[in-house]
């Protein structure tokens, strides 16, 4: 029997009819896969999942369910002690759902993926106590965008963005042209998940540990936070930054010189034919910092052993493809959706390197802290953003509150979340 099987396998390989892996697994397996990637990015994800379903040699079918209410759906499923085999979730799932998702370190034993090929800071963000809960898929940070035509019209080098926040304000003053409804800076007063990126770079984490290892709020007397509020306020008072909530649309209309925003801005700028550049936001007084959120693949405890292995093979394919894969899922996601890489083989691909914008957005500085807002031990980050930080910014920018008073109020509000 062994000689017969060997002969069949040798013939199949000689004819190119079957890849070697078909000999080890021929039973079809379906992987249920939930996520919330709707819109244009979701269309790309659908294309890639379809490609995997067509080309994988393991008879794996990824049955994907994209739902705008994904977060509510997965929370309800887990509460009912059930769920899909695999999800695309946030790095915070290590704190939210540690009892429902498995240790993904196993993927480095069962596939060709290597831990050292991932940027360390992003893996650390997805891990807790040595357990990797999420394999990165997308890094969501904030970046500095600038309109090169407006720079040139103001006598500035169109290829050189501001390197400091002081320069940001200086350049904004030169670009602003009230007669043409052009503003040098475009920070939205209520885009809190963008603004907190700037605030954190200037003043550090919003909640951190004290000398006794207890969590403490960092608002009262924080010179960096005060610097941000004064910097932002000065630009609004001078007319160099509009008091608007939708500065992205103004950027698309060619009315904004410099603005912070996420990678998704790129497609809108290109659609509107804006001659723009993108770079990492400058470091501030808080030092090297790249606060971001990482979304990624998690396998749930409800996956059978067969589905778990199949899900890992999909994640492996996403990053490495097969010998005849022209563009991996990871590289496609960066090239088509505009998100910076986290996986070194993707970052080092000539096609990735050929994109000046992607190269400028990519942070490979392992000294740059990726902690987002607060340590893992603090789990009310969304409330902190909306109920404390956003209120603080609006109190100063639209409410005219004294900065010291606004910081003290934020301290009180933040301390309420620590009780």
Image: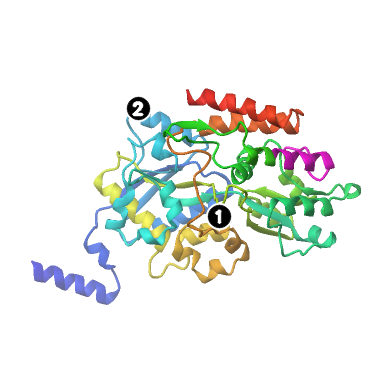
Look at the image and give the residue range highlighted in magenta.
Answer: 229-245
Q: Is residue 229 above or below residue 18?
A: above
Query: Foreground: 205 or 174?
Result: 205
Circle 2/circle 1 CB separation < 8 Å: no
- Outermost residue toward the bottom? 14
Q: Residue furthest left?
A: 1
Looking at the picture, tell me which residue is in the foreground, 77 or 194: 194
The quadrant in which the N terminus is found is: bottom left
Q: Check residue 80 in the rendering and tell me which mark sits there, or answer none.
A: 2
The residue lying furthest to the right in this view is 179
In terms of sequence position, does the residue under pointer 2 or pointer 1 come before the other?
2
Residue 271 in the image: state x and y as whole percent: 70, 55
**Magenta stretch holds residue 184:** no
Q: Is residue 236 left or right of residue 323?
A: right
Distance (Cα) linking label 2 and label 1: 34 Å
- Please tell me how crowded label 2 is: few (under 14), some (14-19), or many (20+) other residues with Cα within 10 Å: few
The residue at which mark 1 appears reads as 339
Q: Residue at x 41, y 46 (%)?
A: 126
């Amino acid at each position: 029997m062994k000689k017969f099987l060997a002969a069949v396998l040798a013939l199949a390989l000689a004819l190119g009819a079957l890849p070697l892996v078909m000999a080890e697994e021929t039973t079809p397996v379906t992987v249920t896969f939930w996520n919330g990637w709707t819109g244009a990015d979701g269309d790309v994800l659908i294309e890639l999942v379809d490609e995997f379903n067509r080309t994988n040699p393991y008879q794996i079918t990824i049955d994907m369910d994209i739902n705008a209410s994904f977060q509510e759906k997965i929370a309800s499923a887990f509460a009912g002690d059930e769920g899909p085999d695999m999800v695309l979730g946030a790095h915070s799932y290590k704190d939210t759902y540690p009892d429902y998702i498995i240790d993904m370190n196993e993927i480095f034993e069962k596939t060709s993926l290597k831990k050292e090929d991932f940027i360390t800071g992003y893996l650390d963000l997805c891990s807790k106590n040595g357990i990797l809960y999420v394999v990165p898929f997308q890094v969501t940070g904030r970046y500095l965008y600038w309109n090169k035509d407006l720079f040139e019209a103001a006598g500035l080098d169109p290829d050189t963005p501001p390197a400091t926040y002081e320069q940001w304000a200086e350049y904004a003053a030169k670009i602003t042209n009230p007669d043409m409804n052009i503003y040098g800076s475009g920070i939205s007063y209520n885009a809190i998940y963008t603004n907190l990126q700037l605030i954190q770079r200037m003043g550090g984490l919003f909640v951190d540990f004290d000398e006794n290892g207890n969590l403490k709020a960092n608002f009262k007397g924080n010179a960096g936070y005060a610097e941000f509020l004064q910097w932002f306020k000065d630009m609004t008072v001078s007319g160099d930054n509009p008091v608007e909530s939708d500065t992205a649309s103004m950027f698309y209309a060619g009315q904004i010189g410099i603005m912070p925003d996420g990678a998704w801005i790129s497609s809108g700028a290109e659609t509107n034919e804006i001659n723009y550049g993108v770079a990492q936001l400058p470091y501030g007084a808080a030092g090297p910092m790249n606060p971001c959120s990482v979304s990624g693949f998690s396998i749930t405890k409800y996956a059978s052993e067969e589905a778990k292995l199949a899900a890992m093979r999909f994640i492996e394919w996403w990053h490495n493809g097969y010998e005849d894969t022209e563009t991996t899922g990871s590289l496609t996601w960066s090239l088509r959706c505009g998100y910076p890489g986290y996986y070194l083989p993707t970052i080092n691909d000539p096609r990735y390197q050929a994109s000046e914008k992607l190269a400028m957005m990519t942070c490979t500085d392992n000294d740059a802290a990726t902690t987002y807002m607060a340590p893992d031990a603090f789990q009310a980050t969304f409330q902190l953003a909306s109920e404390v930080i956003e209120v603080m910014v609006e109190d100063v920018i639209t409410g005219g509150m004294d900065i010291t008073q606004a910081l003290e109020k934020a301290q009180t509000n933040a301390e309420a979340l620590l009780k």
